[in-house]
Amino acid sequence: MAMNVGSADGDEDEVVSAINTTPLVDVMLVLLIIFLITIPVVTTSIPVQLPKERNEIRETKPENITLSVDPGGRIYWNELQIRSTDALIDRLKKIAVLTPQPEVQIRGDGNANYEGVGRIIYACQRAGISKVGFITEPPPRGG
């Protein structure tokens, strides 16, 4: 066996220009092993039942009242045009006393001003209607 004691000429301040990467590789391998062991334990330790996607077809009940607002701001009860907000309040007061109270569904045109929808909500509030909903169209799939 041989042993390197130093240079023969006594020059011991020689600079080593090579980087020793062995400690870096050792640390990285240890970290990799730790992550490989712990990641599957973390992801599978809690059983979770994920929700399934489903489309529910909502049936329109015959007792629901559909109020529509056209682009001109005119209000319609099904297909019957309502002349004024007071006439709408009077009709809604007759419906508000029924048990169970029907739901008022508002169909507002996308180009209509908010004033027409606001008048319907005001009339529902004045008449004592507690269930008011908005009917919208879902965006096209994939767009």
Image (spheres, grey):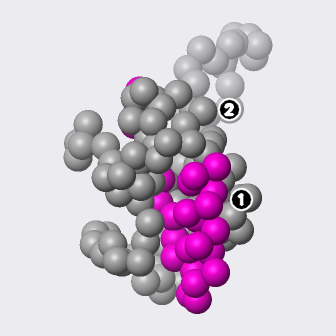
- Bin the neighbour count of mark 1 within 10 Å (Cα to Cα): few under 14, some 14-19, many 20 and up: some
Q: Nearer the viewer, residue 115 or 139?
A: 115
List x then y, in percent, for residue 135.
Answer: 42, 54
Residue 5: image tag: 2
Q: Label 2 sits on what residue type?
A: Val
Residue 125: image tag: 1
Mark 2 and mark 1 lie on one chain; the one further toward the N terminus is: 2
Query: In the rendered structure, does residue 90 fall within the stretch colored magenta?
Result: yes
- Bin the neighbour count of mark 2 within 10 Å (Cα to Cα): few under 14, some 14-19, many 20 and up: few
Q: Nearer the viewer, residue 55 or 62?
A: 62
Q: Nearer the viewer, mark 2 or mark 1?
A: 1
Q: Secondary structure at mark 1?
A: helix
Span highlighted in magenta in the image: 86-111
Q: Label 1 sits on what residue type?
A: Gln
Residue 24: image tag: none
Residue at 48%, 86% (x, y): give it: 47
List x then y, in percent, for residue 71.
Answer: 40, 29
Q: Quadrant of the C terminus?
A: top left
